Image (spheres, rainbow, N blue to C red):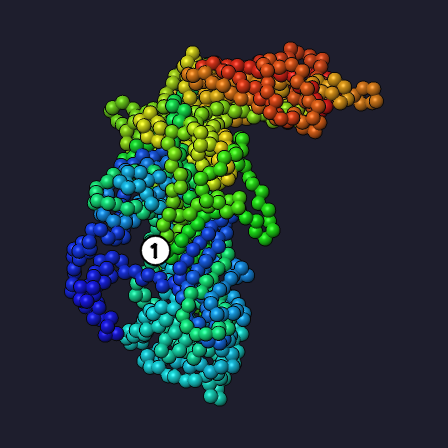
Amino acid sequence: MRILALTGLVLVTLATPAISQSSGQGDISVTIYNNNLALVQDTRRLNIPSGRSVQTFPGVSGQIRAETVGFNAANTGIVEQNFDYDLLSPQKLMEKAVGETVTIVRINPATGKETRERAKVLAANGGVVLQIGSRIEVLRDDRLPTRVIFDKVPNNLRAKPTLSVTLNSTRGGTRPAQLSYLTGGMGWKADYVALFDEAAGKMDVQGWVTLTNTTGTTYNNAKTLLVAGTPSVNGQRNRGGRNNIRRAGTESANRESLGDFYLYPLAARTTIANAQTKQVSFLDVTGASAQKAYEFTNRWLGTQNEPQSAATVLQFSASADGGLGDALPAGTVRVYMKDASGQPQFIGENTIGHTPMGSELGLKTGEAFDVKVKPTVTERRRLSSSKWRSSMSYEISNARSTPVTVSVIQNGLDFYWSDTRIVTESMASKRRSSNSIVWKVPVPANGRATVTATFETRF
Amino acid sequence: MIVRALIAFIASTLALPATAQSDLPATQWARQTVTSDGPSSVSVTVYRDPWRSGDNGMILKYLRGYALITEQRTISLPAGEVDLRFEGVAGGIIPQSAIVTGLPNGVMEKNRDAALLSPSALLNGHIGRSVSIRRTSAATGRVTEYDAQIRTDASGGVIVQTAEGFEALRCTGLNEAIIYPAIPDGLSAKPTLSVKSRVSVPTRATVTLSYLATGFDWQANYVATVSADGQSMNLFSWVTLANGDETSFVNAQTQAVAGQPNKGRDSIVRAIGNAISLRCWPQATTSDISVKRFERARAESRFSGRVLASPAAMMEAQSDVVTVSGAKRVQAQQEELGDLKLYRIPVPVTVASQSQKQIAMFEKGAIPFEQIHEAEIYAKSYVESNTLAKTLRFQNKKRDGLGLALPAGKLVAFKKMSGEKLLLGEGGLDDKAIGEEVEVTIGQSPLVRYQLKSVAEVDNDSKSHADMELKITNASRSDAQVEILLFHQDDHKLKSFSRKIGRKNGKHFWKVVIPANSERVLRYRVVRR
């Protein structure tokens, strides 16, 4: 007993004193979606008396969507559910005290002597008007220190927005009650660390789940499940942004799924603190195959006075066969490469969407310093009122000491009309779509190459 | 009251050593916090602001580039579940980019807590809890303490419950303070990065922490000195780094990366920690002297100094130039890094908080260059006398004394005139690879100008053309190399040029030397097709 007390003291005195929050939460499980949405399920042990009673729930999310609350306890029916967001403040307290009687304590500034009186609050507009016996006064009209002591606080004025449920129970006693609700302010995404070894054509990838909590509430010891998906909320469709998938995969990942969404449960219960960013590893792959490529995309009639850098694109696959072998939740991929001293250095980042396993990805990591393309519209000729001939030249330079291949992409071919014809070209192009062609141009080390082409268009 | 005094007495007399904790059986996963207060060695790699072109200089007050910080930290780890807290990291850390290696059993989770210890956090952490209210009498100096419970959060005034009833704090005109018994869990002075790991045997480990941090930037700065004869120039270059973070990196291995790595925007949970909003009930009185103004004036008179440092004062950039006197000059060494260029500073340097540092990159002499006057003009426009841009052009080739990667930055050009240096102008250049032509526009020439007008126009059903006259005037005492690019609408055609015209960049190109104090005229016809 004595040792116990002493240990307690040691903790208080040696460490910074800290109180642990008894939040009122029960057994918490949190399911977090990508789009700033989470489902919180909170099983509390409540002592519910027989008959009608009102239960309040402290420790719920500060961004609770009250209309999504569900409550469930044995032998209990819900009469009504209230979400009170009228917050207690000095002004509110005084306004609600109009007509009530309060205690006034005046302090004599010279002697410190206190004088106590009962006063009725008549009004709280601009200043507070009081009736003390038969006198009418304005509070602190003399600017002397005066305490106002209220006998009570109105019931519906709260320190925080509070959820309360009026219950009708057929029996009394403590039993588990399940509270569930949706909340904003919690979301997650993936962060990938890719260490690329260009010479070996390999890369090591670690995937981290990054979840953030800005709900204003800490969830203690919560069972946490992450859902890789953005369910439609309020009927809003979620259109995907740029996802960098070159070819969508057809493999299924060895993970639990919920409908079309993969689930990423955290292995152990964890405390998700307010204003916290938490990361947990979910993927660790070494030696996946990866290649680097150069791409340059030119818009229709794009012409440049100065050569422009080609994009450096990192190509890899999410397939089990030589790739990352997993479905990849949306997030940011940060790519590193070892410098001459062996230290990893950052070489660029890009985002991916939710990527099915087996997909092929192409991430632009940056612009190449040494590989540049200068596109020029060399001539525009009008053949007839609806026929134009445009001559293009693309001058590609390579200041690297190794030969490179640059994919030069010309876009905008079906600008308005799709009957674009390539009249001549200095090397064979490949049609990517009705709108786009690509030349794979080999460029010698420290050398140049030029591609020319003539297009016939309606404009 | 008595109990509190007793606890305080025991606590002060019994300075018990920490051995009480080691009585715990080793098998139990005790949770312990280990704090690493700083790195033993650090490396800083600075990346350029991805949204800034070569023409724009760095703004020291608002650095939008970033850095990769790699730190080695040596720590003693006890056995058990360990929360390892990293202190002394850059304030601009992008927490989701943090990588921690070297822990014997790996990392269970990484956390970054942005809930800060502040007056509002203290109050919010004590809602419904017991605190003490301390009142000091202005008349007698007597101090009294009351037990009270906090009934509001920090957003709109403070209400406490005492044995007597409910009171609003600081609406009374008394000297009042809240005394808190302890600090709520999970609050720290600064946003803190920590990792959780399970350690099986106590070890001393060297942990590597690397992360990206915002608030850095760098650029190249070129100083071109044109020789007296105006035919060649000397080019000196600096690597200019800036650290806008509140953390200094002492004796850091320092690098800068040139090129354009792709970088998105990072969402970082903002640190929370505020003052308490102290609002009271309406406090107007019947007096015509404004109490509020009076009280505010009194409150302000207590501050003698400035309330807030101005941004300029906060970012007093000390320029810091690394040179080693007597010995060989320190120069940044260029290495290849994939498709980027890495500049390594060969000696450890201190990348100090809120400062700019310059290290020499290279110096090359006798570089032949051309000074041209140029403009790109729409062929069928009317231009009353306008200036031509003054551009320096040189080839980034070994043959011409250069032939090395030129990272983006500013170039300032001087000319030596009878021992004095004169400023010619300043411009910018983007990343230039070996073998490229470099053009830097250093200003507009007031003396070499152009004028464009139409001298005759025909516009009817069968014909539509305009006869144009482009006149270049040179009022300077030397010859001017002039290069004009003429562009036109797709359904227009230029013909009947009065002088020899070439093509460049898909446009008509007139290259001409205008002798000193003279003019040249180009006539052409713009025809609609």
* Residue B60 at least partly seen: no
Q: Chain of mark 1?
A: B
Name the one closer to the observer, B80 or B273.
Answer: B80
Q: Is residue B282 above or below residue B383?
A: below
Q: Position of residue B248 (x, y in %)?
A: 32, 41
Please identify the residue farthest to the bottom as the structure is shown. A134
Name the one closer to the observer, B31 or A77.
Answer: A77
Query: Which residue is disc 1 drawn over?
Result: B186
Q: Is residue A368 above or below residue A275?
A: above
Residue at 58% from the left image edge and 14% from the top image edge: A427
Question: Which structural element holds mark 1?
Answer: loop
Q: Position of residue B207 (x, y in %)?
A: 28, 39
Name the one closer to the observer, A38 or B255.
Answer: A38
Residue at 16% from the left image edge and 63% from the top image edge: B14
> In the rendered image, which quarter contains the N terminus of chain B?
bottom left
Whether residue B490 sits left or right of residue A278 in the image: it is right
Q: State the image quarter where residue B484 is shown.
A: top right
Residue at 60% from the left image edge and 25% from the top image edge: A432
**Which amino acid type is shown beneath numbered disc 1?**
Gly
Q: How many badges with numbers are in the image?
A: 1
Please identify the residue farthest to the right as the structure is shown. B461
Whether residue B499 sits left or right of residue A183 in the image: it is right
Residue at 19% from the left image edge and 67% from the top image edge: A1
Q: Is residue A79 above or below residue B22?
A: below
Name the one closer to the observer, A76 or B253.
Answer: A76
* Residue A50 at least partly seen: yes
